[in-house]
Image (cartoon, rainbow, N blue to C red):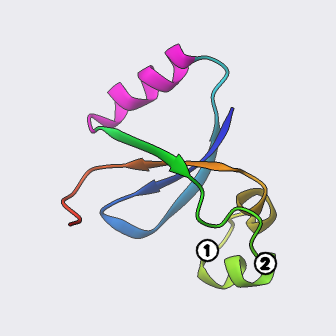
């Protein structure tokens, strides 16, 4: 399953990662050494041109707009 990946501590960190198994997802979490928040992707089905304005260089806006779920690496306090 494909997820848009973001970090709590960075507005510029955006990527897309595909996990084939839950074990891969758990290993990814362990590598981050932080909890993960899995939720609906806020940019799913949004206008690709708008997404492109806010994405870092090299990020595929179409892929972000077509990925229904996201993972936030919870590496900082946000409330």
Cα–Cα span, label 1 and label 2:
13 Å
In the image, what residue occupies the spot 36% across and 67% down? 10
* Disc ID at residue 67: none
Q: What is the crowding at mark 2: few (fewer than 14 residues within 10 Å), some, or many (at least 20)?
A: few
Q: Quadrant of residue 47?
A: bottom right
Element type at mark 2: loop
Horizontal side of residue 16 vs 29, given as left or right: right
Identify the magenta region. Answer: 22-34
Q: Nearer the viewer, residue 56 or 47?
A: 47
Of badges 1 and 2, nearer the viewer stands 2
Q: Quadrant of the C terminus?
A: bottom left
Q: Are marks 1 and 2 in contact (CB under 8 Å)?
A: no
In the image, what residue occupies the spot 50% across and 25% down? 25
At which x and y percent is residue 18?
Answer: 67, 34
Residue 79 magenta-highlighted: no
N-terminal label among 1 and 2: 2
At which x and y percent is residue 29?
Answer: 38, 30
At which x and y percent is residue 73?
Answer: 37, 47
Residue found farthest to the front? 40
Q: What is the crowding at mark 1: few (fewer than 14 residues within 10 Å), some, or many (at least 20)?
A: some
Magenta span: predominant SS is: helix
Q: Which residue is mark 1?
A: 55
Horizontal side of residue 57 vs 72, given as left or right: right
* Disc ID at residue 47: 2
At which x and y percent is residue 24?
Answer: 53, 20
């Amino acid at each position: 399953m494909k997820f848009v990946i973001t970090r709590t501590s960075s507005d510029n960190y955006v990527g897309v990662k595909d996990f084939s198994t839950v074990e891969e997802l758990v290993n990814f979490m362990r590598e981050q050494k932080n909890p993960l928040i899995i939720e609906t992707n806020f940019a799913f089905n949004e206008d690709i041109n708008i997404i492109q304005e806010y994405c870092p260089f090299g990020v595929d806006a179409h892929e972000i707009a077509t990925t229904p779920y996201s993972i936030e690496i919870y590496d900082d306090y946000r409330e």
